[in-house]
Image (cartoon, rainbow, N blue to C red):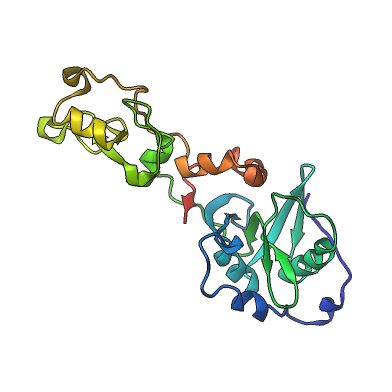
Amino acid sequence: MCQSVDVPCPLRKRSRPDFSMIQAAQHNINPNSPLTKRVLVLNRLYMAVRIVPARRAFQLLCKNLAEVIAVEDGRYYNYDFSTWMELGILQASEEQDDNDDWVQTVRFAIPVPRVVRLLTYDRLPQRQIKLNRRNIMARDHHTCQYCEYQGSSSHLTIDHIVPRSKGGKDTWTNLATACKKCNSRKGGRTPEQANMPLLHPPKKPRINPMVTARLRVERYECWNVFLKNANWAVDVR
């Protein structure tokens, strides 16, 4: 059962939340800004449909298209945007968790929600996980599948295990992350021909690799409640 928490505050007198400060904070966003943190979006039926930047989540909240869902001790708490701001004002005066992110405006600070729920949308996302460079590298943990070199995407490439010249296709089982050196060394040969065995046989992931990577971060652990039985092709924006 979802429970709403009523927090008394002078902001309650307004018919709509004053979010002009939040909107102002969204311009010229720094890449390390709390507004770039990820937020899980649920549909009206509490089913995961997308992961978006906090900036987009605040836009949904400001337009009264969504509400915040907080998970505490296994229970859900629903907050509209006004109540969430009020709660943030109260929490700002207390000791803050290191895993919390806050958007600081001129007059107050507001916590970045981890989960929001759309109030009218009840459809589900497509089930197909996109086959692209980003997802392949996330599946392989940004590690060369030949020499175990681990680095950023700019230092890695995508290798066709069976080369295109030999009929290799763009499939989950024929694409693997490789460092530039190994990719060049392997050339147009198969791993067997180049004597370069793969560390792990490539497979199509059961869940979106980008979602899996975020679940390893403590601040996103609350997503597990909604993703455990979710459509694992949830889109990541």
User: Is 166 situated above or below 90?
Assistant: above
User: Is 86 situated above or below 24?
Assistant: above
Q: Which residue is outermost to the right?
A: 8
Residue 4 lies left or right of residue 133; in this view the side is right
Residue 97 lies left or right of residue 122; in this view the side is right
- Residue 40 x %, y %: 59, 53
- Residue 108 x %, y %: 75, 73
Residue for point 46% across, 40% down: 209
Residue for point 18% across, 21% down: 194
- Residue 19 x %, y %: 68, 77
Q: Is residue 1 visible?
A: yes
- Residue 170 x %, y %: 24, 39
Q: Quadrant of residue 168?
A: top left
Q: Quadrant of residue 103?
A: bottom right
113, 156: nearer the viewer: 156
24, 184: nearer the viewer: 184
Q: How many marks?
A: 0
Residue for point 28% across, 39% down: 158
Q: Is residue 160 visible?
A: no
Residue 162 lies left or right of residue 133; in this view the side is left
User: Is 226 situated above or below 150?
Assistant: below
Residue for point 37% across, 33% down: 204
